[in-house]
Image (tube, rainbow, N blue to C red):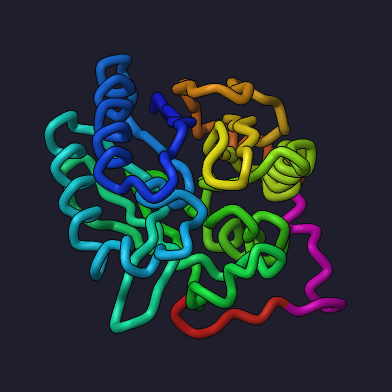
């Protein structure tokens, strides 16, 4: 499966321009042979204007139709990064996942809101994992700050995910954190990680790019600097089980000494 990650510059608060730019980049990735395309965090509004509630997609209707139409047009799966999404009067940072037939197969609201950026004062946190299947492969997605919580990612791995998507809006002062955290999540959970950041200056923030496609050994298969780029790699999922068999961290976990608590339905 050829996976492409779209590292794009998102215009601050310019929703229509952002939809147009993302549409063009998805088209480019499709023409370059992508089977699955991944977007970055809050690509409809950027992270995040003071009027983000007014700019947000109502019930995700525009975004779901947009992604579904492009998936069918190009016959590609799309992990739709995340968008500002209004639902029942509350604001969420939401991922929508559609398969190549345009069917919605996954939906996720960011669980760990970035308190240093006051995200928790504007957005409502989610309360469930997002594990889904595309092309017969179990996959999972989180959003940005979620990647710092290794226990959250481990739950997805325990549910069988072989690849983790991490859309983000990660600024420059913490570039090395971004790279190392994503590599660490790949190694400790023995899965592929596709980390997709924005780039360029947006509002007061300068996003660092640094998107990566990482294999379960932690090897970077493709990466970006701080400019726009479509990263791509052909991913062989058969190596996931080979690696898990060779160093079986899941078998060797000491669950008698610690406990992972899942809510019913996660």
Q: Main secondary structure of the magenta part?
A: loop
> Is 247 drawn above or below residue 113 in the view shown?
above
Is residue 70 shown above or below 55?
Answer: above
Q: Is residue 129 magenta?
A: no
Q: Nearer the viewer, residue 229 or 105?
A: 229
Nearer-the-camera pick, 127 or 136: 127
Residue drawn at x 41%, y 53% as measured from the top left? 82
Where residue 236 appears, x then y in whole percent?
49, 27
- Residue drawn at point x = 70 percent, y = 76 percent: 260
Which residue shows up at 28% across the image and 57% down it? 105
Quarter assignment of residue 111? bottom right
Q: Which residues are magenta?
A: 248-259
Residue 66 horizontal side relative to residue 221, left or right? left
The residue positioned 46% from the left and 58% from the top of the image is: 49
Query: Residue 23 falls in which quadrant of the image?
Result: top left
Q: Decide if residue 196 is in sight here.
A: no
- Residue 198 in view in this figure: yes
Left or right: where 44 falls relative to 198: left
Residue 224 position in % (x across, y down): 59, 23
């Amino acid at each position: 499966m050829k996976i492409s990650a779209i590292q794009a510059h998102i215009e601050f608060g310019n929703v229509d321009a952002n939809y147009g730019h993302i549409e063009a980049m998805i088209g480019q990735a499709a023409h370059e042979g992508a089977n699955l395309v991944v977007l970055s965090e809050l690509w409809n509004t950027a992270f995040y204007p003071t009027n983000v509630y007014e700019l947000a997609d109502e019930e995700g209707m525009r975004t779901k139709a947009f992604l579904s139409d492009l998936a069918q047009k190009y016959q590609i799966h799309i992990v739709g990064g995340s968008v500002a999404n209004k639902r029942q009067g509350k604001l969420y940072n939401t991922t929508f996942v559609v398969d190549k037939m345009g069917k919605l197969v996954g939906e996720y609201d960011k669980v760990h809101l970035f308190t240093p950026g006051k995200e928790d004062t504007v957005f409502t946190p989610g309360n469930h994992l997002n594990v889904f299947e595309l092309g017969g492969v179990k996959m999972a997605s989180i959003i940005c700050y979620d990647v710092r919580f290794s226990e959250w990612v481990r739950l997805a791995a325990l549910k069988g995910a072989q690849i983790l998507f991490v859309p983000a809006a990660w600024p420059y002062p913490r570039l090395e954190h971004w790279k190392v955290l994503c590599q660490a999540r790949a190694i400790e959970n023995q899965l592929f990680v596709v980390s997709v950041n924005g780039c360029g200056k947006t509002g007061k923030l300068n996003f660092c790019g640094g998107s990566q496609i990482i294999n379960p050994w932690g090897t970077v298969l493709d990466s970006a600097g701080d400019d726009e780029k479509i990263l791509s790699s052909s991913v062989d999922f058969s190596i996931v089980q080979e690696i898990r068999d060779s160093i079986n961290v899941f078998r060797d976990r000491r669950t008698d000494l610690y406990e992972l608590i899942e809510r019913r339905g996660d």
